Image (tube, grey):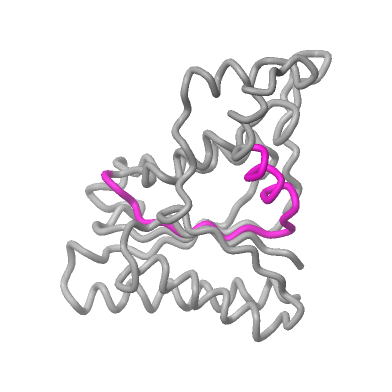
């Protein structure tokens, strides 16, 4: 199985989302020795933000693109190739101000591509081209945004991720959300991380089966 592992935290070794994603990959590797991991650190290799040139090139038919347009799309094309080659995804990120890190938004903007990750049918319908059944979004949140909490309605991250990836063909991703972390007592943080690790262990076993 070829897995694309993407980290998006601006933090380094003290990042909870990075630590949890490494933990999950370690669990998978023990159970799937032949696992092939393609790793992308968006804090290091940050995709370019969308520009006018990018937009024009994207919506120009491939056969009509100038050399300059092709060069503009080169990095995005390479990202799409990596995404389309993956059989499973692990996307790890913290929640920043109720949504995703800007580097992950740039990643999404670079991979939502006509005739690559989605196609438009003759009837005007959209057909996502991603096929992996195994997709994990591993998020860390400073506050508690679980259903029933006072901040539950402030979660803009989950619906944004669901929408973008459903459009590309991923209708049912798994979410493991470690919360609350930053804005909580030590015992609550430890309990949140323990819950996440328990969910990840169960998920690794399901994926290995």
Q: Position of residue 97 (x, y in %)?
A: 26, 44
To which quarter of the image does residue 94 belong? bottom left
Total numbered labels placed on residues in the image: 0
Q: Looking at the rendering, in which quadrant would you find the C terminus?
A: bottom right
Residue at the far right: name it. 122
Residue drawn at the location 21% of the way across and 79% of the way down = 187
Q: Position of residue 128 (x, y in %)?
A: 72, 35
| Magenta stretch bounds | 77-97
To which quarter of the image does residue 115 belong? top right
- Residue closer to the observer: 143 or 49: 49
Q: Looking at the rendering, in which quadrant would you find the N terminus?
A: bottom right
Residue at the far bottom: name it. 30
Q: Is residue 80 magenta?
A: yes
From this view, report whether residue 66 is shown above or below residue 205. Answer: above
Q: Position of residue 64 (x, y in %)?
A: 76, 14
From this view, report whether residue 95 is shown above or below residue 201. Answer: above
Q: Please indicate whether residue 42 sits to the left or right of residue 75 in the image.
A: left
Residue drawn at the location 27% of the way across and 53% of the way down = 149
Q: Position of residue 116 (x, y in %)?
A: 73, 33
Residue drawn at the location 70% of the way across and 40% of the way down = 169
Q: Please indicate whether residue 188 sits to the left or right of residue 175 in the image.
A: left
Q: Please indicate whether residue 187 sits to the left or right of residue 139 in the image.
A: left
Q: Is residue 5 magenta?
A: no
């Amino acid at each position: 199985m070829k897995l694309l592992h993407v980290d998006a935290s601006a933090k380094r070794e003290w990042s909870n989302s990075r630590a949890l994603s490494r933990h999950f990959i370690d669990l998978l590797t023990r159970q799937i020795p032949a696992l092939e991991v393609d790793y992308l650190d968006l804090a290091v290799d940050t995709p370019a933000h969308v520009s006018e040139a990018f937009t024009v090139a994207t919506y120009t038919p491939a056969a009509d693109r100038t050399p300059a347009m092709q060069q503009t799309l080169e990095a995005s094309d390479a990202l799409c190739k990596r995404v389309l080659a993956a059989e499973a995804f692990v996307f790890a990120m913290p929640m920043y101000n109720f949504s995703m890190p800007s580097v992950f938004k740039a990643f999404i903007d670079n991979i939502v591509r006509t005739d690559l990750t989605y196609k438009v049918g003759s009837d005007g319908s959209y057909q996502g081209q991603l096929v992996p059944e195994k997709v994990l979004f591993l998020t860390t949140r400073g506050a508690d945004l679980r259903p029933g909490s006072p901040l539950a309605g402030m979660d803009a991250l989950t619906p944004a991720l669901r929408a973008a990836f459903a459009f590309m063909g991923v209708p049912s991703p798994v979410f493991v959300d470690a919360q609350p972390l930053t804005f909580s007592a030590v015992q609550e943080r430890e309990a949140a991380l323990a819950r996440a690790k328990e969910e990840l262990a169960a998920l690794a076993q399901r994926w290995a089966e």
